[in-house]
Image (cartoon, rainbow, N blue to C red):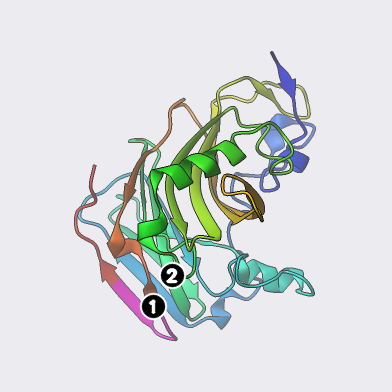
Amino acid sequence: MLFRCLFFVLLPGLLWTANAADRVPVGTYLYANPAQADAATGALTVHFAEGGQRLVVAWGRHHRKDRESRDATTEAEREWFKPFKAQVAADGKSARFPHLPPDFYDLVVLDAAAMQLWEGLAMQSGADSALATDPVMATVRATLDRPAGRIAGWDAFFDHKQFDRLETDGELTAVLVQQLRQGQAFAESGDVIPGCIHSIDVVWLRRAQGAEAEWQVLQRQQLYRDELPARTFFHHHFVPELRGIRIGTRPRDLTLPALPR
């Protein structure tokens, strides 16, 4: 069945014009673009053992949606709250964030050519690894796999989901979800969208009162979205070295070991 979708409603980071060729590039609204980026004197350069076609994202902890409300904030302030996208060298062996405000950052590294995803996300404050069991993941999956309405707008569009990792303190939970749409989709112009649309999200949930197997969705943060030829999920790896990188007011260099495959 073919679906005609208005992307500026369903996918807030992807805006389509009447002419599909004139669309806004993917990620234009997804990643931080502060008007005065040079106001932050902290910086990070990441060095990799191997090259590749990388996208590298630094996600600060202080302004995450589960910790700080967006209410009464300006558009300019919210730009600083978004994940930051690195400037990656042509050979993929280094990635530079020239301006980062002081914070602890977790990194996400993607190689779309090899369909590899590496991450070190600390998703849920106060999480207890002993509580992140398969039965808990099963109940979260059941919540997010339900028909449209559980997470407004986006979960009905994507027809396949993969749940990679979960962190919980027993009552609050965050889960890393890959989503893709294998079915045909259309731009507002009516043109068929080439490729398969992929999305990588962190979703925060709260356990429903009096229901051990029920969860209420609180927030969602999209960390990646693109159209790719591949119609399969990224191969996921959790890498502790990508977690909790402290940035102050000076540049910092980080050299990583070879990433697993």
Report x, y in % for residue 5: 75, 29
| Residue 28 visible in this rendered orientation of the protein | yes
Which of the two residues, 85 or 257, is positioned nearer the viewer here?
A: 257
Q: Is residue 216 above or below residue 196?
A: below
Location of mark 1 (residue): 246
Drawn side of residue 227 relative to residue 13, left or right:
left
Report x, y in % for residue 227: 54, 34
The answer to whether the residue labelled 2 contacts the one labelled 1, judged by CB atoms less than 8 Å apart, is: yes
Furthest-front residue in this view: 210
Report x, y in % for residue 88: 39, 56
At 67% across and 21% down in the image, what residue appears?
Answer: 192
Q: Which residues are magenta?
A: 247-253
Location of mark 2 (residue): 105
Residue 149 among those drawn in magenta: no
Q: Which of the 4 quarters of the picture holds residue 86?
A: bottom left
Give the CA distance from mark 2 to mark 1: 6 Å
Which quadrant of the figure contains the N terminus? top right
